[in-house]
Image (spheres, grey):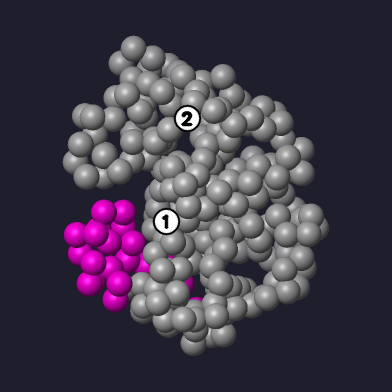
Amino acid sequence: MKVGLFIPCYIDQFYPQVGIATLELLQKLGCEVEYPQGQTCCGQPMANSGFEHLTHGCNELFIKNFAAYDYIVGPSGSCVLHIKDHLHDPHQEPAAQSIRNNIYELVEFLTDVLQVKTLPAKFPYKVGVHQSCHGQRGLGLSQMSELVAAPFSKPMQLLNLVEGLEVIPLDRTDECCGFGGTFCVFEEVVSVKMGKDRISDHVKHGAEVITGNDVSCLMHLEGILRRQKSPIKVMHIAEILNQSI
């Protein structure tokens, strides 16, 4: 299958190792991966701030870069969800619809499309999993704890395949970290307090590494951990799944 690799802005600028890990992981699992060089922002920051009418140029460019691929895969639940829900173009709506139907967050792609059952990765650490709101509530990557339903978690499904990795339990499995895009700017104090509460749950249960599938959330948590001078590391799930393959 031909996969177009979608790398959001903040990963490209601040966490390029996540993009590289995603590329390597997909290639090692047998995908033919291409990175369209002309890709830029998907438009999510503008749309989330009430300016979706200004995202038409982003939509046109996204369609131009990704219309030719069987699948589009990105290591970011929030950006992928934005494309799934909001990519439209009155002049290219069939192409936009095709992309909306064929774009996947990385974990979703590995579990639902590739149906990965074995993964020769090694990571001998205690890992806490942060379930990001976009991934959980928007993409359905894991069950919401307030629902009376059988629990599931696609990220944990993959992490349990990694040799030596111990997923630690948490008291609040799906609490928001407080990042929330521009929320962390306009409501800084509330955002930081939520992040500190999220981290304390991981600390309480002995996490050595905090992982998740949204770098935006992990970036927020990492900033707090650095200010606390904590030894806990933050890693995107792609980096862990790509270990020692």
Q: Secondary structure at mark 1?
A: helix
Q: How many marks?
A: 2
Residue 97 % position (x, y): 43, 24
Residue placed furthest toward the bottom:
204
Residue 10 % position (x, y): 43, 48
What amino acid is at disc 1? Ser
Residue at point 22% right, 72% down?
189
Judge whether residue 111 can be spotted in this image.
no
Does residue 85 appear left or right of residue 16 in this picture? left
The quadrant of the rendering that contains the C terminus is bottom right
The quadrant of the rendering that contains the N terminus is top right
Q: Quadrant of residue 236?
A: bottom right
Residue 234 in the magenta stretch? The answer is no
Badge 1 density bin: few <14, some 14–19, many ≥20, Cα 10 Å: many
Q: Which residue is mark 2?
A: 39
Q: Secondary structure at mark 2?
A: loop
